[in-house]
Each structure stands twice: as structure tokens, then as C-alpha cells.
Amino acid sequence: MPDLLYLLDQLSWISLIDIGLVALLFFGIMYSLKGTPAVTLIRGLFILILLVLILSGPLHSLRAMRWLLERTLPALLIAIPIIFQPELRRALERLGRVGLWLQQDPREAPVDEVVEVLVQTCPRLAERRHGALIVLERTTGLQTHIDTGIRLDARVTPELLMTIFAPNTVLHDGAVIIRDGRVVAAGCILPLTTGWLGDPQLGLRHRAAIGITEVSDALAIVISEERGTISVALNGRMVRRLDARRLQLVLRNFYSPPPEVAQTYRWLQELRELGRRVWLVLFPIRGAGGKQ
């Protein structure tokens, strides 16, 4: 206990800030990787490093093993960015959208209007066996995939979606991407998942829906042309055979801005308001006569 008190006494406030920043950095990295396959890779990497540290003493006498580890570890450091490329890209995309959080409250997006239109339209498409693929953009930008389709920039309406996905139309085979309550583009090409779907009868629409949710945080709705069923994909997983009530519940729970986005926006707004108040205290606004 006295040693701990002595150590704390030697730490300056700059050292405490330094330790706090490092801890915050590691917390942010682990939080961004939560729920992804990278967690298993990190666990394996941690076990490997732990074994190297434990065997560091006996390795001095094992020349061949020491030579192998000395040659392998530098290559492993180069391989880490390649292994974690999807996670790093997603983290950088989230960081790059901080400016958008400052400009617009994510809670102001026309979520309710879009949800109501989709709840009305999707059962009608399923009843008529009109295949459809609708992607709802969230925080990860989908501009690369939007550029593969036909730009529309139209308000989301049941009539528009029914027309796009009507059989024998030019755009019915591609995906519709919705951003901020508007149909940005139709006929878009999406990446296909390479994983096993569990049902060999699921077609390219379902593979594309899961594929786009594997590379982004988008939400995808699929209408099966053969079965007339409604499915929703998110984070590489799919919920199938939804009716109108369950579809509405899923959309309201997951299409709304993520909690961390809304919380971050509130923190930034409070920080900006605090800065404005401090500025007014330090530099009060003077009247035309020069008096406060």
C-alpha cells in the first residue's frame, strides 16, 4: 500500500492525462471491434504474444525457435493491417462522419415517413410476388454502390417503389438505396456474400442483402419473388418471414440512428454550447455605445 501511494504521488497530472488517453484509445478500439470476427483474431494474437513473453527466458537457449520468432514477428506486424482491413475501414468511416454529426442532428432524419412507406409497400410486393431489394443507408456511406445504379433523388413513396420493382421493368433487378428519406438510386449492384446461407433456395437478392450488410452498417429488405416472403438483413445476418407488424418493429428498432451516434451528437452539442458560454463570459458582447 505505501508503494502504491508513493507511485501515485510521483505521477503528475500530465502523466494521468497520458494514461487516460491511452486507456481511452484501447477502449475505442475494442468497442469498435465488438461483435466482429476480429475479436477472435485479437484473442489469438494476444495468446501468441503471451506465450512469447512467457518463453522469452528459455528461448535464449533455443536458437532455432528464437530465430523463427525474430523473423515472424515483423511480418506479423505488417499483416495486421491486412487482416483487420474491414474493421479499420469501418472505424475510419465512423471517424470521418463526425463533421456530419456537427452539422445535422441524426434524429431529424425522416425515419417515421420511410418506415410507414416500407410497411405499406413491402407486403404488397410480397403478395404480388414482385422481387425487391431495398437498402437503407445508415452511418456508413454507400456512394460507391450508388454510383453503379441510376440516380433518381426522389421522395420515397409506395407508388415509386411499386413501379421500380414491377416485373419486366429495367430497374427491377437491381437494388434501391434510400438515404435521408429519399430514393437516391435504383438498379444498384451490391457485393454478394460468400458465406453459407443455410437454405440453398435463397437467391442472389438474399446474397446481395447480406453482402452489403457485411461491409457496412446498412439495413437491407428483401422480397422473395419465388416465395413472396419478406426478410431483413443487418450485420451479416438475416431475419426471414416477416409480416407487416414485425417488419415495422424491426425497422423502428434498427433503422433509427444508432444510440452511439445520437449520444455522440448530444455530447458534441453540449460541448459546443459550453464553449459558446465560456466565450461570452470571456468576451462579452458590447452595445453600440461601448457599454455592456
Image (spheres, grey):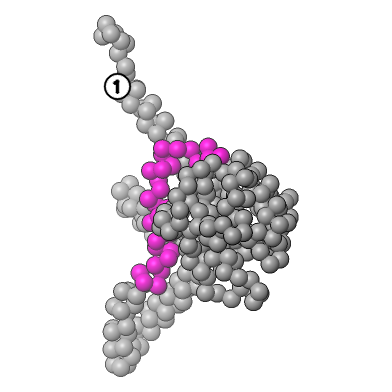
The magenta stretch spans residue 256: no
Q: Which residues are magenta?
A: 81-110
Q: Secondary structure at mark 1?
A: loop
Q: Is residue 230 above or below residue 268?
A: below
User: In the image, residue 46 lies at what x, y percent?
Assistant: 43, 74
Q: Is residue 281 above or below residue 164?
A: above
Looking at the image, the residue that sits furthest to the front is 168
At label 1, which amino acid type do we have?
Phe
Looking at the image, the residue that sits furthest to the left is 290
Quadrant for the C terminus in the image:
top left
Q: What main secondary structure does the magenta stretch of the protein show?
A: helix
Quadrant for the N terminus in the image:
bottom left
- What residue do we see at 41% from left, 43% from top? 100
User: In the image, residue 91 lies at what x, y percent?
Assistant: 41, 58
User: In the image, residue 8 lies at what x, y percent?
Assistant: 37, 53
Looking at the rendered structure, the number of numbered marks drawn on it comes to: 1
Could you say which is closer to the camera, residue 66 or residue 165?
A: 165
Looking at the image, the residue that sits furthest to the top is 289
User: In the image, residue 99 lies at what x, y percent?
Assistant: 38, 43
Q: Residues within 10 Å of mark 1 (few under 14, many from 20)?
A: few
Q: Is residue 62 visible?
A: yes
Q: Which residue is mark 1?
A: 283
Q: Seen in the image, is 120 located left or right of residue 56?
A: right
Could you say which is closer to the camera, residue 80 or residue 222?
A: 222
Asked where in the image residue 103 lies, by quadrant, the reply is top left
- What residue do we see at 63% from left, 45% from top? 158
- What residue do we see at 59% from left, 66% from top? 206
